[in-house]
């Protein structure tokens, strides 16, 4: 069987994305697991090779089928959308934000066209997207629009701990308002469907509590009593293997030990803190509920260290490996 084709957009050219991509492609572990195709700008890629000292031969191709995937070769679909006379490292740039979007759009096109099995993304910058006239706040929203999915799911995985998120980029006050029985039921059903596509069929999903000690039956807030418990009851009566609410101070530890196969975090930072404290570099984001698989590093563009050959490629390597691991659950076989 052929190794899966994983397409990697280089992210914001002014950030660390190009550097971590070329470093990751020098890894024998990556070469053994996947056929990687990079989407980006040839001048930016050559610059990243110069900065990092990585020795790779760049082969410009039009589509993955043309690639040569031996270790030491970098297959590049070159959009060449950066004017190097205007390019600056480590600064917000509309040119770079627009270019980053175009790399993603091309990558999604390849995956939707079954020329690639998954997409593994690198960091983009929200301010640069806005400056470039891109009307999306981040990757998840971009992928949702390009794949025709209204509300894609976000899952983090690190060391076998899997965490879904009931809400993402909203205020904490808004996040509390989004803890409703209907939303929990919908998210659990869709999250379990994502797990099935990833090959995870055994085990129980836990729903984290919102309030301290899951509210102590209404003593510290009534969201668990009014929303979470009724959602769990409805789901269990319908045959779904779920438990909760489980206090957020223990549920992630229990899932890491294998008591639960996943956790539904009720707001952004609740799950982010748990996973990133466990292993920041190896916390990988998976966007589910779409017709294609997308994994991603879960760190930013790091403008402050871009161009300095400081950025670690560990997350990029992990994102590619996880995309290769889970891609059989998605149609493609490019």
Image (tube, grey):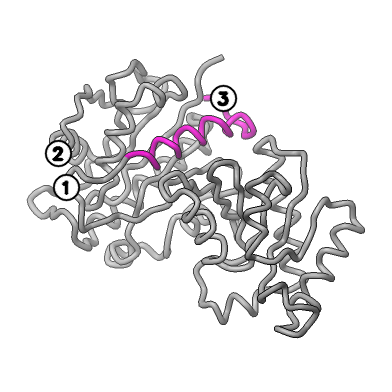
Q: In the figure, is residue 222 to the left or right of 240? A: left
Labelled disc at residue 162? none
Mark 3 or mark 1: which is in front?
1
- Compare residues 232 and 3 and report the one nearer the observer: 232
Q: Quadrant of residue 133?
A: bottom left
Residue that label 1 marks: 307
Residue 182 percent location from the top left of the image: 77, 69
- Between discs 3 and 1, the one toward the N terminus: 1
Q: In the figure, is residue 223 to the left or right of 279? A: right
Check whether the beta carbons of the residues at disc 2 and disc 1 lie within 8 A of each other.
Answer: yes
- Between discs 3 and 2, the one toward the N terminus: 2
Name the image quarter holding the N terminus: top right
Residue that label 2 marks: 51
- 135 relative to 152, above or below: below
* Whole-number angstrom distance, CA of label 3 to CA of label 1: 36 Å
Q: In the figure, is residue 256 to the left or right of 318? A: right
**Is residue 306 a member of the stretch shown in magenta?**
no
Residue range highlighted in magenta: 313-334
Residue 146 percent location from the top left of the image: 50, 51
* Whole-number angstrom distance, CA of label 3 to CA of label 2: 34 Å
Q: Secondary structure at mark 2?
A: helix
* Whole-number angstrom distance, CA of label 2 to CA of label 1: 6 Å
Residue 161 percent location from the top left of the image: 60, 47
Residue 183 percent location from the top left of the image: 72, 68
Q: Residue sitting at 87 percent across and 64 percent down?
A: 234
Secondary structure mainly formed by the magenta segment: helix
Mark 3 or mark 2: which is in front?
2
Q: Quadrant of residue 188?
A: bottom right
Residue that label 3 marks: 333
- 132 relative to 47, above or below: below
């Amino acid at each position: 069987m052929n190794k899966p084709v994983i397409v990697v957009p280089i992210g914001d050219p002014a950030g660390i994305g190009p550097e971590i991509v070329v470093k990751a492609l020098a890894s024998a572990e990556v070469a053994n697991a996947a056929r990687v195709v990079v989407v980006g700008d040839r001048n930016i890629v050559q610059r990243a090779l110069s900065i990092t000292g990585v020795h790779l031969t760049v082969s410009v191709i039009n589509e993955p089928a043309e690639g040569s995937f031996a270790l030491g070769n970098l297959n590049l679909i070159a959009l060449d959308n950066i004017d190097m006379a205007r390019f600056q490292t480590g600064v917000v740039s509309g040119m770079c934000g627009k270019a980053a979007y175009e790399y993603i759009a091309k990558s999604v096109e390849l995956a939707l066209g079954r020329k690639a099995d998954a997409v593994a993304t690198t960091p983009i910058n929200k301010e640069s997207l806005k400056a470039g006239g891109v009307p999306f706040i981040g990757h998840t929203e971009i992928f949702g629009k390009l794949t025709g999915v209204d509300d894609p799911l976000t899952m983090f995985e690190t060391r076998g701990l899997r965490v879904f998120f009931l809400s993402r980029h909203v205020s904490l006050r808004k996040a509390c308002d989004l803890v409703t029985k209907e939303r929990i039921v919908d998210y659990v059903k869709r999250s379990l469907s994502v797990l099935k596509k990833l090959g995870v069929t055994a085990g129980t999903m836990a729903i984290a509590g919102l309030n301290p000690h899951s509210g102590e039956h209404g003593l510290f807030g009534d969201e668990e009593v009014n929303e979470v418990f009724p959602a769990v009851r409805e789901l269990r009566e319908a045959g779904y293997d779920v438990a909760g609410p489980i206090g957020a101070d223990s549920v992630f530890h229990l899932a890491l030990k294998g008591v639960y196969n996943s956790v539904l975090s009720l707001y952004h930072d609740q799950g982010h803190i748990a996973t990133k404290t466990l292993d920041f570099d190896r916390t990988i984001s998976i966007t589910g509920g779409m017709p294609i698989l997308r994994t991603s590093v879960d760190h930013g563009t790091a403008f402050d260290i871009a161009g300095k050959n400081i950025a670690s490629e560990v997350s990029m390597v992990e994102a590619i490996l996880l995309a290769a691991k889970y891609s059989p659950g998605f149609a493609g076989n490019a």
